[in-house]
Amino acid sequence: MVYTTQQLIQILDQELRATWKGERVLLSSSDRLSNPVIAKALGDEKLSKVFAYQDFQRQIHQYQQEHQVSGLVWSQCEFRGNLVRFPELHHQLVPISSDKDILISAKPSVLDFWWKSTASMIFWQAGHDPLQVEIDYVKRAIDDAEWLEITVGQDELYLSLCWGDPKECHYQWAWPDSRCERVIAAEATPRLTNL
């Protein structure tokens, strides 16, 4: 029997809880950290917890690859009476080769939800200082994106435009090969701009 994505998430959650309770011990964990000052500041107990969980998570990721268990979970988003279900990579898992195709195939339904939900709203490019952008900019950015992710705020809708490796796209260091830019739809100036 091969474990499912949901079962792997439950296993990881259980292991994380057990690790932080001190039920998992990794000896000589301070040897793994190349900076002795940081190792001493954190202490062997904390380092042991971090590395024990990382080792376990690495084994789960290998299991995913060997058995082709998807790292995607399905999220549901509702805004202004509109509803969409879309796949996204779970933060504790890695994508398998077919996961990116699933993300890409969901782009039309996410896009349909975005346009229905943002009628008459103002668009902003997310960042430290949000920049108001025109609808043509948003359309071009959407066309360039490989897949889309949606996040709902209280009165705002956030569209993530993603490219490259699903596991790396949210990290600045992965640019330009993988990236994720965000557009915000709001009635006025958005409240949360770095979401």
Image (cartoon, grey):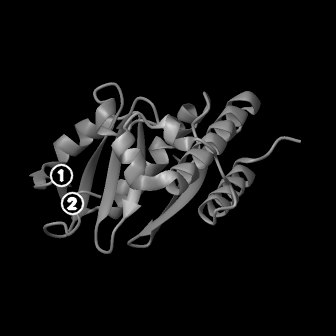
Callout 2, which amino acid?
Thr
SS of the residue under disc 1: loop
Callout 1, which amino acid?
Gly
Residue shown at 76% from the left, 47% from the top: 4
Quickly name the residue at label 2: 193
Left-right relation of 181 to 36? left
Residue shown at 32% from the left, 62% from the top: 157
> Is 81 placed above or below 5 here?
below
Residue 135 visible in the current orientation: yes
Residue shown at 44% from the left, 50% from the top: 110
Q: Which mark is residue 127?
A: 1
Q: Position of residue 19 (x, y in %)?
A: 63, 58
Left-right relation of 12 to 181? right
Within 10 Å of the Cα at label 2, are there few (<14), some (14-19), or many (20+) other Cα atoms? some
Q: What's the distance in space between the residues labelled 1 and 2, CA to CA? A: 6 Å
> Is 172 placed above or below 7 here?
above
SS of the residue under disc 2: loop
> Is 18 placed above or below 95 here?
below
Residue 144 visible in the current orientation: no
Left-right relation of 178 to 47? left
Q: Front-most of 187 and 191?
A: 191
Q: Residue furthest top?
A: 177
Q: Residue furthest right?
A: 1
Q: Please say if the residues under marks 1 and 2 sit with CB atoms less than 8 Å apart.
A: yes
Q: Position of residue 155 (x, y in %)?
A: 29, 73
Where's the C terminus, which quadrant? Answer: bottom left
Q: Position of residue 188 (x, y in %)?
A: 14, 69
Within 10 Å of the Cα at label 1, are there few (<14), some (14-19), or many (20+) other Cα atoms? some
